[in-house]
Amino acid sequence: MAVIKEPGQTGVNWSNIAVGAIMNMVQVTTLGQPLEVLKTQMAANRSQTMAEAAKSVWARGGIAGVFQGLIPWAWIEASTKGAVLVFTASEVESATLGLGVGPATAGLLGGMTGGVAQAYATMGFTTCMKTAEITRHKQAATGVKPQSTWAVFADIYRREGLAGVNKGVNAVAVRQCTNWGSRMGFARLAENGIRKVRGKKEGDALGALDKIAASTVGGALATWNQPIEVVRVEMQSMAKAAAANSNRPAKLTIFNTLNYIYKENGIKGLYRGVTPRIGLGIWQTICMVSLADYVKVWVKTGKFTA
């Protein structure tokens, strides 16, 4: 999200809806979904090492297991949440910069607002269904024909209604607010630091490698909130071991789920999957901050500058 108004922008920049959808589709279809699957596997099965989690993911069907949940839920989620994020965050960031707020604070506010907006607008049911796809018991192993993804959705909706398919949405909102607030805030802060090192003034353009470096810092530092992600996965998990644990609360909330994970697995349990999530956070921030800055300007001017 650019720290200045895009060239030619006089009002609401509706083209950012398309930019966000396209960039997030690119992100999830490349490195995004494999890292998401590995991170979710570790968060849902907290006794597994990363090597064991990777082996379990591969055993589910090789490359198809690595990209499990991509079609349709990750694609639906990526296109819709990317559109909401880039549009909302760009408008908030531009508006706050116009009030004299610094780039890091503007990035923080834009990311927080965009994160909350995407969670409640699109991510409740898509994240729930994507997690269900990754964690649910594989019926094929017992000789039973597995349910289609749409059948799983219909079954959850029939049993639990809208609350069921939006299970964990509050945890998603907290995660996305802290995720994108941290990613954009830290990335813009890093950009300012790089400008000072380079002898540039505030607002001066940075090179592509400098912007990628800033996004790498932002994406890595934003994983401080991993416990929220582990809670979200546990709330949405359909893993057999989770359902069979008598200590697991029957009605999960953010706080009783956090307490349950801590009692079962300690502090380490709350940070399971943080290593692949660092990689995921870096890649997401590069795509949705650095590269999106260039694409937004290209849409307006036909030139790749940011």
Image (cartoon, grey):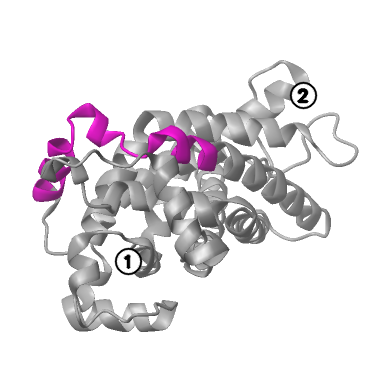
- Judge left or right: residue 198 versus residue 155: right
- Element at badge 1? helix
Amino acid of disc 1 = Glu
Residue 306 showing in the rendered view = no
Q: Which mark is residue 300?
A: 2
Of residues 10 and 123, the one drawn nearer to the viewer in this rendering: 123
> Counting other residues with Cα less than 10 Å from the Cα at mark 1, is it few (<14), some (14-19), or many (20 or more)?
many
Q: Residue at x 36, y 44 (%)?
A: 280
Instruction: Find numbered disc 2 in the image and state the secondary structure of the residue it sits on.
Output: helix
Q: Which residue is drawn at the image coordinates 26% and 29% (left, top)?
A: 64
Residue 292's place in the image compared with 159, above or below, is: above
Q: Is residue 141 visible?
A: yes
Q: How many circles with numbers are drawn on the protein?
A: 2
C-alpha distance separating marks 1 and 2: 42 Å
Q: Which residues are magenta?
A: 51-78
Q: Give the residue type at disc 2.
A: Lys
Structural crowding at the residue carrying mark 2, measured as other residues with C-alpha within 10 Å and reported as few (<14), some (14–19) or many (≥20)? some
In-front residue for pair 270/305? 270
| Residue bearing the label numbered 1 | 234
Q: Residue at x 80, y 30 (%)?
A: 7
Where residue 155 sits: x, y (%)?
Answer: 43, 54
Q: Tell me, yes or no, whether the highlighted magenta stretch contains residue 136.
A: no
Quarter of the figure with residue 30? top left
Is 227 or 107 nearer to us in this picture?
227
Q: Position of residue 66 (x, y in %)?
A: 25, 35
User: Is residue 69 rendered magenta in the image?
Assistant: yes
**Residue 107 relative to residue 220: left or right:** right
Q: Nearer the viewer, residue 169 or 173?
A: 169
The residue sitting at 30% across, 47% down in the picture is: 134
